[in-house]
Image (spheres, helix red, strand yellow):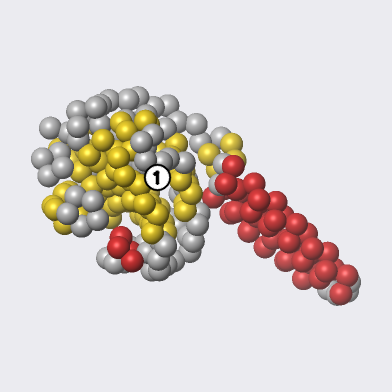
Amino acid sequence: MTIHKEGYTIIGGTALLLLLINWGVRSLTPELGWLHGLLLLVSVLFFVLIVQFFRHPKRVISQDERQIIAPCDGKVVVIEEAVESEYFQGPRRQISIFMSPLNVHVNWTPVSGVVQYFKYHPGLYLVAWHPKSSTDNERTTIVIRTAQGVDILFRQIAGAVARRIRWYVKEGQPVEQSSEMGFIKFGSRVDVFVPLDADIKVKLGDKTVGSVTVLAELA
């Protein structure tokens, strides 16, 4: 387990801010020992929460060209047929994974192939489980074409707390299944759109492990 590079600045800034707050309170209220102890406890707990959010676990992975793996840790909140209007402009099977602030927030590539399409959309910050978050929130849309010629679309979607999406891919780039492709800070969601004839391997409420859990298999 390591700390993700996206967390270095935030962790360092948080540590400095908490140190200054604790020093300031001690200086202004030297007689209130109970307050100093309580503030120190709250500061330590808050700092631990920030650090755990940016944890970067090592995953034992396997690759299979027929499988679509989970791009993130979280909980399956949507499995339904939906019309994808940005790229496919037609029906696909949508699988959505909600990431709470306690989940690992690294994002992994669900399939191997070549990035056919990429677009970043600035937007709103509705709660990640809101139906319109997929189309109205800050998000990225990424389409990967597999060696078999199948296009798989997935979206990184910011939530009410998450307001910063990172991605490490671009159009025309070859990518490998389970390689790291991005990060979403502080609570969010990822949507995956697969062909209608794909064999879905998860059900609503399932917990996913990014780069490990199989979401679906291609026909």
Name the residue nearer the viewer: 45 or 4.
4
Relative horizontal placement of residue 70, taking residue 46 as reference (left or right) = left
Q: Quadrant of residue 176?
A: top left
Most distant residue in the front direction: 172
Q: Quadrant of residue 145?
A: top left
The residue sitting at 28% across, 55% down in the picture is 77
Q: Quadrant of residue 138?
A: bottom left
The residue sitting at 37% across, 64% down in the picture is 137
Q: How many marks?
A: 1
Q: Is residue 185 above or below residue 107?
A: below
Position of the C terminus, as image quadrant, is top left
Q: Is residue 209 visible?
A: no
Residue 15 location, x and y as percent? 72, 55
Amino acid on which the number 1 mark rests in the picture: Asp
Residue 175 location, x and y as percent? 37, 31
- From the image, tell me which residue sits under label 1: 73
Relative horizontal placement of residue 200, taking residue 163 as reference (left or right) = left
The residue sitting at 83% across, 69% down in the picture is 24
Q: Is residue 195 above or below residue 164?
A: above
The residue sitting at 48% across, 49% down in the picture is 166
Residue 150 location, x and y as percent? 19, 35
Relative horizontal placement of residue 185, taking residue 92 as reference (left or right) = right
Query: In what element is the residue under mark 1?
Result: loop
